[in-house]
Image: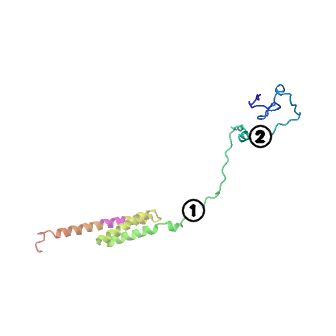
């Protein structure tokens, strides 16, 4: 005989299905062995069958809750922003570069243009320092240094061209008959 609920094989003298615990109707119970009225089904119905013991009992899934949840804000582990070390204002200031560019510009007009290669290098350094000094508090001095160094650059290049051209001209045959 089989259980009407789960289809498991029923014992002939049982009042409940050994698998699902469904009561067996009175008509199907055999009257050969009467059982006591206070029969409790076994807690482990398959204690004598090792194959059925290994099978897990069917578990119904928990109902899914579709109600919207309130988002919780994650705890703030750093309530204050960490201190970022900054350099003092006088170290970030590039006023020294602007002043140096101005001094080099003045010196280039006074005589560095007369020294061809060395004057050219010094004037280019003055221009670079002037452009770097534009981000300082002494922006006006940096602009003045750039202008003076640019004039010194033009003077140095002009002098180099003049010296080169005069050397070439001086070496032309027949240009100076007294040589």
Residue at the image position 23 percent from the left and 67 percent from the top: 162
In front of the other: 153 or 118: 118
In front of the other: 69 or 170: 69
Side of 157 relative to 50 (left or right):
left
Residue at the image position 35 percent from the left and 72 percent from the top: 107
Is residue 71 visible to us here? yes
Q: Residues within 10 Å of mark 2 (few under 14, many from 20)?
A: few
Side of 145 relative to 16 (left or right):
left
Side of 140 relative to 169 (left or right):
right
Judged from the image, the secondary structure of the residue bearing numbered disc 2 is loop
Residue where numbered disc 2 is placed: 48
Counting from the top left corner in percent of width and height, residue 104 is at 37, 70
Name the image quarter holding the C terminus: bottom left
Q: How far apart are marks 2 and 1 (CA)?
A: 73 Å
Residue where numbered disc 1 is placed: 84
Q: Does the magenta stretch include residue 150?
A: yes
Counting from the top left corner in percent of width and height, residue 53 is at 73, 41
Residue range corresponding to the magenta coloring? 147-154
């Amino acid at each position: 005989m089989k259980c009407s609920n789960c289809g498991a094989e029923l014992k002939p003298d049982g009042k409940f299905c050994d698998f699902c615990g469904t009561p067996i109707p009175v008509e199907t119970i055999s009257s050969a062995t009467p059982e006591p009225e206070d029969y409790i089904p076994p807690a482990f119905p398959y204690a004598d069958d090792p194959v059925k013991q290994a099978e897990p009992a069917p578990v119904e899934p928990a109902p899914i809750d579709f109600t919207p949840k309130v988002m919780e804000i994650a705890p703030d582990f750093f309530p204050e922003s960490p201190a970022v070390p900054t350099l003092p204002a006088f170290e970030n200031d590039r006023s020294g570069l602007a002043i140096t560019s101005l001094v080099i510009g003045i010196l280039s007009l006074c005589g560095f243009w007369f020294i061809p290669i060395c004057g050219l290098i010094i004037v280019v350094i003055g221009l670079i320092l002037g452009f770097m000094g534009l981000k300082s508090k002494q922006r006006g001095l940096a602009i003045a240094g750039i202008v003076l160094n640019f004039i010194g650059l033009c003077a140095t290049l002009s002098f180099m061209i003049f010296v080169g051209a005069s050397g070439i001209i001086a070496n032309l045959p027949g240009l100076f008959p007294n040589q």
